[in-house]
Image (cartoon, coloured by chain):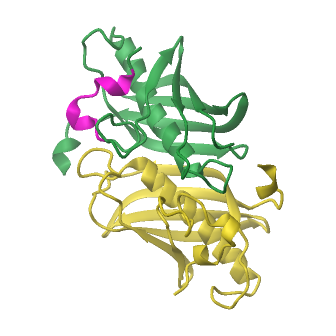
Chain colours: A green, B yellow
């Protein structure tokens, strides 16, 4: 399976959350899982809130990059493409992020973010995400993702 | 000046975002600034979204820990205490987090989170935060923070 993040052009592959070229970052990878999307990540030892529980900012980061990756998968599919067919996928930015922390998230096991995608405009998608540790639903989140403006890289 | 995070008991000082004992983490520090609260942080080189712009998950993390730290400062003050008077402050957890990303956030300069605190219940506080890079308002966020249950550390 090919993650959507493995298809981003090099200039867009430095994200601390999901850039394959950022060796200091999380390198989140997002895949289709039937009609849903999935990102699995095992937090590093230091990524804790208190000993034994995962840091909330890491969960927010997971939901964020999972959201933009899921939106990219969805628009890519709408455009007739699947990862691996050679086409370059669209790239999204986060307009807003909401996270409800439902349970302390146990550390030391993989977290699984599962996304459900909703198109609200051709360039604006909402991704609803649930984060599980084993079968425990620990957090729910929503990302509003917008197609990255062509000017984004040039603004620096 | 003494940051609220410098007063948390040792067991609660391992947070990846704001724990003074977590040497891998961000070590955010939150202070009173008149009636507002302030956390200043300069992102590390790797904490980027694309080259030249700060990673959104880092901004969400900053707003999150700034929120719980601000709530702790506020309840501590309501209880008659200021950092440095020897009293142990309350510790909060995040119930939910919302972030609106308003502008691409330039990398390489300090970010300043400014909090405005609202009490909605003796054990539940809302912190409204604006994040600036120099004078540019880059993100706005809201944290609902709840007093940490006494059982939290025992749950592990």
Is residue A73 placed above or below A18 in the rendered structure? above
Residue B74 percent location from the top left of the image: 67, 76
Res. B84 image quadrant: bottom right
Q: Residue at x 71, y 79 (%)?
A: B76
Residue B19 percent location from the top left of the image: 57, 65
- Residue A152 appears in view: yes
Up the image or down, A23 lies above or below B107; here it is above
Report the residue that reaches farthest toward the left.
Answer: A154
Q: Nearer the viewer, residue A50 or A60?
A: A50
Is A80 displayed left or right of B4 in the figure?
A: left
Identity of the residue drawn at 66% across and 57% down: A50
Asked if residue A29 is among those painted magenta in the image, a careful observer would answer: no
Q: Residue at x 56, y 67 (%)?
A: B21
In which quarter of the view is residue B116 placed? bottom right
Q: Nearer the viewer, residue B132 or A22?
A: A22
- Residue B156 in picture, x, y percent from top left: 76, 49
Q: From the viewer's perspective, is residue A121 above or below residue B16?
A: above
Picture coordinates of residue A127 (x, y %)?
Answer: 52, 29
Between residue A131 and residue B67, name the one nearer to us.
A131
Residue at the bottom extreme of this rendering:
B85
Q: Is residue A143 left or right of residue B4?
A: left
Query: Is residue A149 in sight in this rendering?
Result: no
Please state if A104 lies on the left or on the right of A153 as rendered. right
For the record, the magenta segment spans A3-14
């Amino acid at each position: 399976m090919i993650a959507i993040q493995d298809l981003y052009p090099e200039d867009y592959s430095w994200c601390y959350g999901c850039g394959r070229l950022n060796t200091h970052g999380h390198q989140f990878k997002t895949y289709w899982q039937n009609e849903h999307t999935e990102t699995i990540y095992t937090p590093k030892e230091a990524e804790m809130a208190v000993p034994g529980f995962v840091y909330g900012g890491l969960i927010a980061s997971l939901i964020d990059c999972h959201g933009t990756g899921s939106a990219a998968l969805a628009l890519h599919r709408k455009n007739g493409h699947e990862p691996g067919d050679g086409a370059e996928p669209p790239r999204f930015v986060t307009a807003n992020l909401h996270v409800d922390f439902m349970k302390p998230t146990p550390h030391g096991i993989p977290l699984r973010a599962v996304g459900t995608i909703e198109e609200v405009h051709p360039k604006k998608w909402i991704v609803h995400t649930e984060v599980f540790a084993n079968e425990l639903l620990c957090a729910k989140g929503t990302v509003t993702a917008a197609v990255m403006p062509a000017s984004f890289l040039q603004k620096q």
